[in-house]
Image: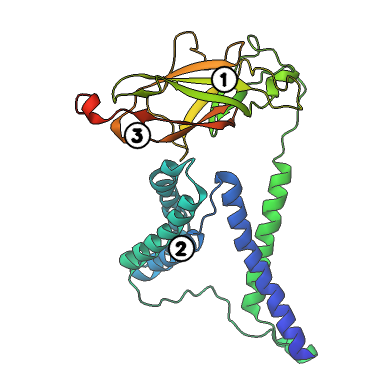
Amino acid sequence: MSFFLEVLIGGLLSGVMYSLVALGFVLIFKASGVFNFAQGAMVFFAAITFVGLQKEYGIDFWLALPLTLAVMVVLGLLIERVVLRPLVNQPQITLFMATIGLSFFIEGLAQWMWGANVRGLDLGLQDEPIQWLTDKAGINVSKFDLTAAGVAAGSIVTNMSTRVEAMPNIDFQAFALRFEVEIARDLWMPLDLDDTPLNANSTVSAGGGHVATQPVMGCPGQPLEIVIDAVNQGGAPGGNKPAAGKYTEVRFTNEELLPGLRPAPGYANWRTDGSGRIRLVYTPVRADQSKLFLAWVDGQPLGNIGTVFLKPPNQCNGQ
């Protein structure tokens, strides 16, 4: 029975420490939208830096602690600016692979800076059983594990209480709101309520419609007009009728924006007109031959797919 209790208590203490690690993953993901697989490597870098400052440079414990914090702040800023920020709006698999590669880089950097030798850190806590508990109940519980679990639990409780206390008191006074509309995936535009009154039709998804190019075939370097006719989805207010006043964008099927795409005269606000039509102008290059593209209306792709068709080079002056 005593062995069972030892294993149970040891597992619970370890679980508390693992929960602190999990909390770190959650906080980073909720703040940045990135599941940071390099978190363990960053903890390793902080630990080896903390020990290295003491062992290699003879810096006092209480001075090495703020210096390590400063180093980690600088490292975090560099990672955000150099690695994560350029990957904004990229597929999740890209961020996944980037953080895995970052973990290997940080581990290598730590060993390059401080060496690969094993170092010990004396915190004044011995990894030995609590004697009175052993004598009274015959159960061995490590002082070190109990203290570490206590610190981890205190950190978790402090974090949770801080989040509750940080909730602002709402003062019901006049304030201004800024509305934005997603005109395409991850592409937002301010919504002027003075010019666009809110009504039931302003949120109807334009999922149906038609996409065409004029002319059907052109040459590289010659403007191509993309004509989009959007229709509201059936079963909603305004269903099966022209989707008027809808923000519109065009992307290739790999979700890349068509470079240099611009609205035709009369459509400067990137909205469909009263008939649900909008004309956009694009200048293709030879590499665009046979590329497929989708029209996004109010953040929803139309069911019809467009294609860029170009004439042979011998009909386009060799282009």
Quarter containing the C terminus: top left
Instruction: Pinpoint residue 250: horizontal percent, then vertical percent.
Output: 48, 28
Residue type at mark 2: give it.
Ala
Residue at (45, 77) in percent of width and height: 120
Q: Which residue is at the far left?
A: 318
Residue tagged by mark 3?
289
Q: Is residue 16 visible?
A: yes
Residue highlighted by disc 1: 229
Which residue is denoted by mark 2 in the rendering?
Answer: 41
* Disc nearest the viewer among 3 and 2: 3
**What is the secondary structure assignment of the residue under circle 3?**
loop
Query: Which corner quadrant of the image does residue 108 belong to?
Result: bottom left
From the top left corner, tell me how far across and down residue 270 is, in percent: 52, 17
Q: Earlier in the sequence, mark 3 or mark 1?
A: 1
The amino acid type found where label 1 is placed reads Asp
Q: Earlier in the sequence, mark 3 or mark 2?
A: 2
Residue at point 23% right, 30% down?
Answer: 313
Percent coordinates x, y for residue 164 in the rendering: 73, 45
Residue type at mark 3?
A: Gln
Residue 212: x and y, percent? 48, 23
Query: Where is the N terminus found, in terms of image quarters?
Result: bottom right
Q: Earlier in the sequence, mark 2 or mark 1?
A: 2
- Left or right: residue 240 compared with residue 47: right
Q: With respect to residue 174, does 313 lie above or below?
A: below
Q: State whether residue 59 appears in this view.
A: no
Distance from disc 2 to disc 1, alpha carbons, whole Å, reads 52 Å
Q: Neighbour class for label 3 at 10 Å: few (<14), some, many (≥20)?
A: some
Quarter residue 144 falls in? bottom right
Determine the residue positioned at 35% across, 74% down.
Answer: 116
